[in-house]
Image (spheres, rainbow, N blue to C red):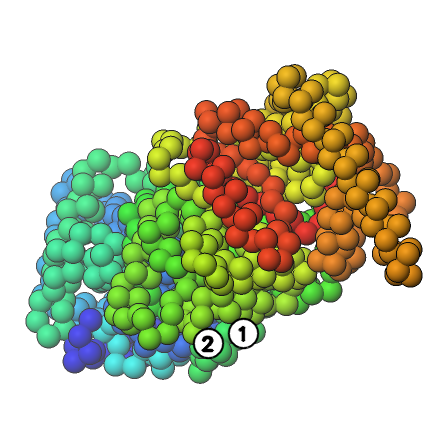
Amino acid sequence: MKGSGRRFGTFGGVFVPNILTILGVIMYLRMGWVIGNAGLRQTLIILVIANLITLFTAFSISAIATNMRMKGGGAYYLISRSLGAEVGGSIGIPLYLAQALVISLYIVGFAESLQLLFPDLEGLLITLTTLSVLTVIALISSRLVIRIQYIILSVIILSLVSFFLGEPASAANIHLDSAYVEGYDFWSVFAVFFPAVTGILSGVSLSGDLKNPARSIPAGTILSVVAGALVYFLVAIWFSLVASPGELTGDSLIMVAIARWAPLVYAGIWGATLSSALANILAAPRTLQALAADRIVFRFLRKGRGRTNEPVVATIVTFVLVAGVLLVGELNTIAPVLTIFFLITYGSVNIIAFLEGLINRPGYRPTFRVHWFVSLIGAAGCVWVMFLINPVACVIGFVFVFGIYLVLKRIQIQKNWGDFRKGIWSSLTRYSLVNLERLTDHAVTWRPSLMLIGRDLIAKQKLVEVAFGLTQKSGFLTCVNLQKSGEFDTEKLNEDSVEFKKMLYEKGISAFYKNAIVENYLTGQLIAAQVHGVGEFRPNTILMDWSESIRGTHQRTSTESTSQFKLIRFYSELNISMMLYHVNADIQRSGYRKVDVWWDPEQKNGSFMLLLAHLLASGRYWGELKLTIKTVVLRDKLEETRELLEKLVNKSRIRADIEVLCPDTSEEQSLGLQFERHRRMHERQEKWLSSLRNALGIRENKKYTYREERSQEEEKLHIDPRILERDELEGSGDDDIKEKLSGQISERDTFIIRRNIREIIAANSKQADLVMLGFVIPARGKEKKYIEKTQALLARLPDTLLVNCPFDFDLSD
């Protein structure tokens, strides 16, 4: 709404529309029936409960309205600016329908009461004529509607005066106890009465026309609730003093019979129905206009007239909708659902005020303060009353609202109004991190917190997809795009960020994305890995592109790749797992269906790789995956190894096939003889060197086998023992199986297998879609040779994930 068009104050803009809706047909036609059933004592309880729920909702409305600059749209504006476009639209559309269709109920009520005096009049003619007249009045000017409402309020006051001056009161007639007719009890009577006090949104709906919404909405809303409650209390007491329970339950027009001047009560009934219809004829188009302005519904509906932006198009659409309902005539069917829509709106407003007060968001600074517990009671009361009124209608209402929410979510309504959703998640995150800090890690509770580090990540979509496949179900993914200072353009960087996030959204990938400006790529990696996260929430796994990790290998010094593996050693000391992903452009697959996990009994990576493969399969990002564990042993160990791996897989509760391979028999014999020659030659050399040392008086150093040397190296890199604590009293889990797998491999076996392993892997995984290989961090000074051998193998394999984990997993936990 245009600010210059605001011209209503507290009384005319909020109080009068509210009180006219509150003092409606239920007061005239149902209040006597409520007292006749419930008796005065329980009726007063009904009034207290109903008005408290409404009053608490009024407090919530007042708090939210004084925390923002109110524009047109009323309750929809409050909700959408607090909960976002999707939630606002999912409640705003049903609210509009309720405001529009309830017009038909009031008009039908007016027509039926008019027919009591003039039975020859045609009902449909009355309703359509009345709708047309009221719509014309609304189209002429909302100011005219307010002036007419002043007249109607005067008529209602006179009708109440006539009621109280009618039959003389007598304390002897008072009936305190209930006398329910068959089929009714306290709560069913409460459900009949409660819609009487749900008219407090009429004034809020004129928010765009108020001179000072922050002052008028709280004052006018709360005053109307208090005034309405006072009138209902007085009417209840007076009914109990002037009529018997039988008269009250048997005559819906008992108020007319009691009044001194019956025509005034009829005029009050007509005024109540017409004023409620007029209030909603003003409210519904403004809600629709606000929805159109936010692109929730068709944009042409936002068009208005004049400097006050009167919603002409929205009013005409509302007229057509209401006229169609009047022609169809199925009002009794939809009436309960309309009440539910109003209550969902009230409940939403209470929930907003409750959450805002609870999370203590710095941006929430209303001038009208209300404790969050009050709003919580209001929200609970609204939900409770919904089920009391009509459980079936309640379910239909919620399903309808949720359906609209899903539609709006699907069409990607992109609005940022500074709503408090981020505040809610921030509070939950803070609470979680504080409590997470107090707990130690355990193998059972491990989940991947994966950091993907690289340059130009927008060009590495497959790398991002693999990372998400590993974290989709139970982990966290952070993508860090490294940019060297002095070599980037800020505008291009921002464009790439937008494009990358768009790619994530289109592929359904949930990930955090950050740009990091660094002086040096290697130190930038290290800084990102160490400083990212809060408290215990920090990366435990790093994923990089293999091609970046070997950058510079072709150079004589290969300084960059050497430094990269130095960093990998440092990650291991920090208990951070490392993964290097190689994309083979010459062997492309449409997707991942078959994953080969190569198990090396002498490494600690096997269980970790199996867990990663399980995460890929369970995440379903790649669809149904077939996992195969493959290993290489000598022929005489084949069956034993198969049995041990099957036991390990069964204990891990991970579905995977087992494939145990062995070198060619002739090669095995030839390499076995070669190993014996090497061993004997090594023993002779050692014997000769030992004799020389003794002759020279040099103390002999302890000698290690190949396996012991590697174990010593791993111990240097290893592990804070707290990283994955296990209870001391727990069983051995799968550790004994791994020890048997490792223990059966002799040095002779290792010598033979190492000479064949690359050929066997290349030959037996060429049909796979993804290959997972463990890697041992090469010794210092041997990085270039290791890279060259690995690169030669990777060139013959499809996409491959190289994995190094500094600790072991017990998958049987």
Q: At which x and y percent is residue 789?
A: 52, 42
Amino acid type of the residue tagged 1 in the rendering: Asn
Measured as percent of width and height from the top left, residue 188 is found at 53, 45
The residue lying toward the viewer, choosing from 470 and 509, is 470
- In depth, the one of 6 and 488 nearer the eye is 488
Residue type at mark 2: give it.
Answer: Tyr
Task: Estimate how packed mark 1 is, as few (under 14), some (14 to 19) or many (20 or more) residues with alpha carbons within 10 Å.
Answer: some
Q: Position of residue 555 (x, y in %)?
A: 43, 58
Circle 2: element type: loop
Tag shown at residue 242: none
Q: Can you identify the residue that label 2 sits on?
A: 364
Say which residue label 1 marks.
Answer: 360
Q: Is residue 287 left or right of residue 624?
A: left
Query: In the image, what residue occupies the spot 74% across and 31% down?
Result: 677
Q: Are marks 2 and 1 in contact (CB under 8 Å)?
A: yes
Residue 322 appears in the rendering: yes
Marks 2 and 1, how far apart in space?
Answer: 7 Å
Residue 374 lies left or right of residue 445; in this view the side is left
Quarter occupied by the C terminus = top right
Residue 632 picture quarter:
top right
* Residue sitting at x 86%, y 44%: 687
Image-based side of 748 in relation to 796, left or right: right
